[in-house]
Amino acid sequence: MPSRARALSAATVSVLRAISQGTTYGFDIMDETGLPSGTVYPILTRLERRGLLESSWEDPSVEREGGRPPRRHYAMTRAGETALGNAVARFRKLGQPLQEPGS
């Protein structure tokens, strides 16, 4: 990554905020943010590549019991928490509203 951090978009901040508030699964993140899968999943991939998120697959026994495919869950790293705080501060300083997850 270049020495200068890239600014996060409003959609990216919305995804990070949802994860920071406990929403960890892709479809749930879509529901929480109101963003489509074609937006959410590329954001999740980019954030993980940048080290702002980590992901893990759920225990295979859970998916078998539920009769469904495995779910990938996301968690913020310390770098992600810092990036989210900086982005929220930047949007507030610019006077740009941020949509609250779930609204």
Image (cartoon, helix red, strand yellow):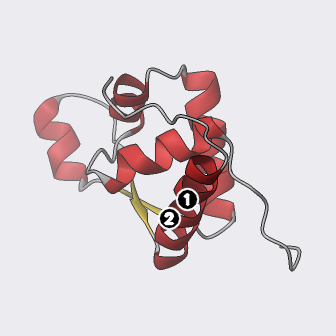
Per the image, label 2 sits on a secondary structure element best described as: helix
* Residue kind at label 2, given as amino acid type: Gly
Image height check: is 84 above or below 44? below
Residue 25 % position (x, y):
35, 41
Label at residue 10: none
Image height check: is 23 above or below 36? below
Per the image, label 1 sits on a secondary structure element best described as: helix
Residue 58 % position (x, y):
28, 53
Can residue 73 be seen by looking at this rendering? no
Nearer to us: label 1 or label 2: 1
* Residue kind at label 1, given as amino acid type: Ala
Quadrant showing the N terminus: bottom right
Quadrant showing the C terminus: top left
Q: Quadrant of residue 101?
A: top left
Left or right relative to 39: residue 35: left
- Residue in the picture at 52% in, 72% down: 82
Q: Which residue is the extreme one toward the right? A: 2
Label at residue 89: 1
Q: In which quarter of the image is residue 28?
A: top left
Q: Residues within 10 Å of mark 1 (few under 14, many from 20)?
A: few
Which one is in front, 9 or 22? 9
Can residue 94 be seen by looking at this rendering? yes
Which residue is the site of mark 2?
Answer: 85
Left or right relative to 39: residue 63: left
Image height check: is 78 above or below 19? below
